Image (spheres, coloured by chain):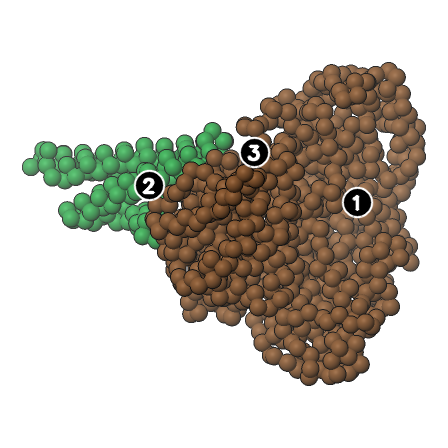
Chain colours: A green, B brown
Amino acid sequence: MNGPACIFAFSLVISAIEIFTQIFFTIMFSDLESDYINPIDLCYRLNNYVLPEVAIHTFLGTVFLLNGYFFSLLINMPILTFSINKVYTNNYLLDATDIFKTVRNHKKESFVKLGFFLVFFFFSLYRMIMALVDADNI
Amino acid sequence: MASQGAPAHSRRRLYPQQQYDFSAQQPPVVDPAAAAYSASPIYGQSGQPVAGGMFTPATAIPGPVSSAVGSAQIGGPQVGINPAPSYGYNTPGAEAMAGQFGQMNLGASTGAGTPAAAPALPLNSLYNIDLLHQMPPPINDLSLPPPPLILPPTASVTNSPDSNAPYEYMRSTLNAIPATNSLLKKSKLPFALVIRPYASLLDKSKPVQVVGDTVICRCRRCRAYINPFVQFLETGNRWKCNMCNLTNEVPSTFDFNVIKNIASNRYDRAELNHSVVDFIAPPEYMVRPPQPLVYVFVLDISVNAIKNGLLATAVRTIQESLDRIPNKDGRTRIGLIGVDSCLHYFSIPASSEDYVSEPSLLVCPDIEDPFLPVPENLLVTLSNSRENIDNLLSRLPDMFAQNTNQNNALGSALTAAYKLISPVGGKIVCITASLPNVGIGKLEFRDDKKFLGTNKEGTLLQTANSFYKSFAVDCNKQQVSVDMFLFSSSYQDVASLSSLPRFTAGQTHLYPGWSASRSEDAIKFAHELGEHLSQEVALEAVLRVRGSTGLRMNAFYGNFFNRSSDLCSFPTFPRDQSYVVEVSIDETINKSWVPIQSAVLHTTCHGERRIRVTTIAIPTTNLLQDVYASADQVAITAYLTQKAVEKALSSGLGDAREYLQTSLTTMLQTYKKDLMTTNVGASAPLQFSANLRMLPLLVNALIKHVGLRKSAQIPSDLRSAGLCLLSTLPAVHLVKYIHPDFFSLHDMPDEAGNPSEETGEIILPPKLNLTAGNIATHGLYLINDGQILFLWVGRDAVPLLIEDVFGVPSLQHVKAGKAEVPELDNPMNQRVRSIIAKCRESKDQITWPNLYIVREDGDPALRLWASTFLIEDKSDQALSYYQFLGQLRDKVNN
């Protein structure tokens, strides 16, 4: 397997992980809305995953940057900037005291991310296959 | 209805002062609702509020219906089971009355197009007024009761006059609920409830009926409590839940008096007669045995609190309040923690006659990881250790009189206090005069003058350290609530500190510039802390609000923690706050009225588990005009205030003001577009429903309020404290807080200031509009917003008046600023003092307002401050009320 194929295989894996994380988040938020979980437990559980989620996404962005895949980086930028900005301004953690007022926004955010990563997953798949095909042609 | 209003309107416009004087001038159509309105004080006329205004003409009509049910009740005890009260439908009386309604309801189109709704009663009628022609606004409207809730006479099973909730306990923004969500959306009016389960600090000042036999009859499915609006079926063996329509069994003990061991009449039961009842809960409602009341005082002993005399005053007040703290069962416990840069624990051994054991002081310098130095005697039972507590408290100020420590580790002290009481739960009372600058949860001085008045100001209102939120969550788990009494002379970060009370159902009290050397300050604090400690606070409480099928409680506002999407938890339940619940309509409602019920499960401070249930029944409608005609301006203001405070805390003050303005504009636009038939041209008048005519003034006042006003002069601490009050004050006090009462004292009527012959209460002078136009230079005025009193002395006040009121020869000798009116032996002085005392008297608030004497020729800062309360006038950054209306008109017409 050649370099580009490796990178897009990697981005494929990352997208898959992100998709699962966002599905998990969405399910948890729905649970909260239907009272299957209390806000304290929810925040305690989810807050463990917020930073790693941003970290792997940032790592993916860095890999694209270092290898010069600027288009891939560009399409990741909006969400990446949003996440990093949240961490930077220190309001990335879920807050049990006002979670019921913000849960709708959190859910929306998770949906948007989920949608993006789904698209990006297939984009990565396509690029990986293209890279593999290109490699065979040489 | 609008079409009938129009000609009448144009005719009346010639006599603006006579508008809507229905009693003097009969309107062309008299429908019963209008009669109800004009029977109670009329909008636009100055009149005293009538208590009975709550009830509908239908239920209030004495006669066949009530007697029919009454006779059924008499038959009850003999048969054992009462006939179903739905008999009322078939009695000739009811029919006759229905016919009466039909005749009276000549032109009103209510009921038309409501096939689903059962025979609809004529609801409140809509009266148009032109806001710009109603100048000055009739401020006596603010003290009127909300539009009556009009229910069919058979709605309540007992037809008791107390069957619907009094508005001080629960009021709805809409006293006629739209039957569909689309109508609610179309109306642009908010649908929310203002709930205040307790209307007084002590039970004895407003007693509530208690159901003592632990027969708690609830719906199997929706868990609603039985209430005056249910229906009994099958000769009384079953009851139909009015929330979810499920048929339930009536418990066998329901018609039986367990205490006296005899059969009893169920229609005598309190829960079927009263909308506000306390159930005594059996053990199934307890997670653990009722815990005792616990108070831990966290006292600031750093140099700031010594210098302004706070520690001595606080300790003396606590000592004096020891006998007033609720302690009927002798289990109340007390603890004390002193804090500077170390934690000071006080070990108080039990008082015993055998040997004399002294309280001891334990100092722990470890503030990063606070621990309890000894396992016992830090939290002691008040009754057992009374002498030692007294002994300790009387020596405490001297122990630290020489303290020069400038640091304060409040967060660490709170953690320690939390460790101390977490096994039991209770209240932590923080009395502090410094910014917590060391230890856990330390805060920084961030009050940058540059930020004030800019967009960045919003960040100063947010919590700076996440400790104050995470700690609030921990406190909730262990049923601990925190109250803040804040006294700093400089920046104290009220914004951060207030988030603890906000999420633990406590309260923040700020005393800016407080000093014990001024007796007024000392009295104020001593009074407020004393009242705070002696109120009959409830413990370990949860609030749930249930609505009829189709209604969903959407959002909750107030000081508490949302434990799940529809459950608010209160470690302790204070009696001086109210809560706003936003309701959404999920499904079309096909009943002619719907019940909503709030239930507070709590432990009283006397060790009893109880449930306070409040039920309100509200008629529904399919017509937009009914929705507007029955809207409650005070409740809407309470809702808008909560939303504005939320916006201010999350996205800044500009957004909050914008929100208020937009909400009001959309209401006026909707009113014009959908309810006005003659709306033409850009010069169309600004019309609104008569029952909402004060809403623009209240919104305008809110935009000018110290918590939300656009200004670069207001320190963020004052703003935060203002926002705390806005989001917790009960509706009546909230209205006064944003629109102060304004009295003229030099020319008050003779009876004002003297006790009334009927009630014995002091009569207040008539209220004036808050505008400088009402201030004569020779006058004496009083402004009361519930938190502060201003006594304004005009610059040309006659020496005789000055002599009478202040006992000094001329205006130059009157001492301005925080002061009291001296006690003199002349009628004018006595009347002024009585009025001030009456303004301070309160059975449902702990606040004792300070009096500021303002001389018109005196200190400009003080004068400027007092004049910010004249909210109908133009201020430097805000419009006058008239301009505000003009601006609204332009927006509405474009």
The residue type indicated by label 2 comes to Val
**For the residue carrying disc 2, how many other residues have a C-alpha within 10 Å: few (<14), some (14-19), or many (20+)?**
some
Q: Mark 3 lies on which chain?
A: B
Q: In this view, does B776 lie above or below B25?
A: below
Label 2, label 1: how many angstroms apart (C-alpha)?
A: 52 Å
Where in the figure is residue A132, as x and y percent of width and height? Answer: 14, 34
Measuring 82% from the left and 56% from the top, which residue is drawn there?
Answer: B761
Q: Which residue carries the number 3 mark?
A: B291
**Residue B319, image x, y percentages:** 59, 52
The disc at residue B831 is none
Q: Is residue B312 above or below residue A11?
A: below
User: Residue B591: which quarter of the image?
Assistant: top right
Sooner in the amino-acid sequence: mark 1 or mark 3: 1
Badge 1 element: helix
Which dot marks residue B54? Answer: 1
Identify the residue at horizontal 28%, vertical 46% (top origin). A76
Is any atom of residue B547 visible in this view?
no
Q: Which amino acid does label 3 sit on?
A: Gln
Q: Residue A50 carries which label?
A: 2
Helix, strand or loop status at disc 3: loop
Residue at the location (34% across, 49% down)? B366
- Name the chain under label 2: A
In the image, farthest residue toward the left: A138
Chain containing the residue with disc 1: B
Label 1 neighbourhood size at 10 Å, few (<14), some (14-19), many (20+)?
A: many
Query: Which is nearer the eye, B105 or B821?
Result: B821
Position in image of residue B721 (x %, y %): 54, 58
